[in-house]
Image (cartoon, rainbow, N blue to C red):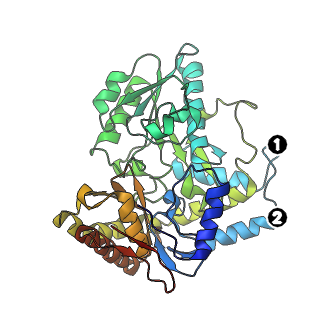
Amino acid sequence: MALEPRSQRQKAAIDEVETYGAHNYSPLPVVIASARGAHVTDLDGNDYIDCLAAYSAVNFGHGHPALLAAAQEQLGKVTLTSRAFYSEPFGPFVKALADLCGKEMVLPMNTGVEAVETAIKTARKWGYERKGVPEGRAKIIVMEGNFHGRTTTVISFSNDPDARKSFSPYTPGFVHVPFGDAEAIEAAIDDDTVAVLLEPIQGEAGVIVPPEGFLTAVREVTRRLGVLMIADEIQAGLGRAGATFACDREGVVPDIYVLGKALGGGIMPLSAVAADRDVLGLFQPGQHGSTFGGNPLACAIGSAVIELLSTGEMQSRAVTLGARFRAGLQPLLDNGWATEIRQVGLWLGVDVEPQFGTAKELCYRLMVKEVLAKDTHGHTIRFAPPLVITEDEIDAVVAHTLAAFQEAAEGKDMVHSDPGTETEIDA
């Protein structure tokens, strides 16, 4: 099954990528040229509603005025010094983020997986130097179905065969337990366990929400048994789940927050680990670092992101608009077109009834209707529009989604409407 780009211009742009770029992604055939708010525009001027928000990196919309202003102001000053020197925006950023997290220290990095690697190193260091675990024996408990990135260490405890195949040997020191099973976590903890690493909501797995009380139980177990609780809030945090952090939904404060994506406002890569001094304060000069980590430009944007979150408006929008989105999609279940819909905040996972096609095929259909969403694990569509999306735009996405599923159920073809193009696909 293949859907052609809308024009020869876009086809040429895609061919260039496919010829000279490594094939580590399989994008939908649309070439984005500009964006604003919840909308993106392709090379031919066609407008789409963005329902992925760069995997939640664009929580506050494309080109948010406050974030652009912060970036532009800093661009005219200094963008990179490395951590060999202090920079003016660094202190205000780490203080603001520490305050947001209720923690004493922050270690900034660039990408989410770098922050996860940092958290792993932090937990091991704490285990050896504070808990007294013998060197080389530290273990971290991880969840089945997890997604924390694709570095060699992180794929070592992934369950995704695509992420793991042909990349061994793998890093030892990780123990898998079922996601949502606090009793299994407790049973897996022994004297060498230094941490439990989890996503409060598993995004890449399909917006999998654990049973109510799971996070509370994990917090109690880890505290009682002297193990660090690490919450990977890279996708779930910073407003997406209807709260500043997804852990807030159960009033849980982990020992370590792992943050990224939306922290950079969709402008710069920016991630961070936040923890108290007795955990994060163990690092000494030369033991961890990054040339670009905590750079002035990213820090200035990060501070503006934290300011946006301080009002609570984005979190409230996620709650209200997410409920509206979920209610609008109920006919998918009523008509048997979807088998399950999971929703938390402005984040939904829709499992497609297999007889009507794969999730990617439905994403093609949505693209034809100028809605961009992303499939995962073959059968699930993820919807995560920017939190600045309006009610009318949510209603439009709902209408297009219902129409796309109905056409799939009826076996109708997908056809782009641009004149002079022949971009048709048989369902």
User: Residue at point 23% right, 71% down?
Assistant: 410
Earlier sequence position, callout 2 versus callout 1: 2
| Farthest-out residue, bottom | 419
Residue 262 place in picture, x, y as percent: 55, 58
Q: Amino acid at mark 1?
A: Ala
Residue 147 place in picture, x, y as percent: 46, 42
The reply to whether residue 116 is visible in this rendering is yes
User: Residue at point 47% right, 78% down?
Assistant: 422
Q: Quadrant of the C terminus?
A: bottom left
Question: Quadrant location of residue 124?
Answer: top right
Residue 53 place in picture, x, y as percent: 50, 64
Residue 336 shown left or right of residue 81 in the figure: left
**Element class at badge 2:** loop
Q: Which residue is under mark 2?
A: 77
Vertical relation: 106 (above or below) 136: below
**Element class at badge 1:** loop
| Farthest-out residue, top | 134
Q: Which residue is under mark 1?
A: 84
Question: Quadrant location of residue 280?
Answer: top right
Residue 8 shown left or right of residue 291 in the figure: left
Residue 212 place in picture, x, y as percent: 27, 46
Numbered marks: total: 2
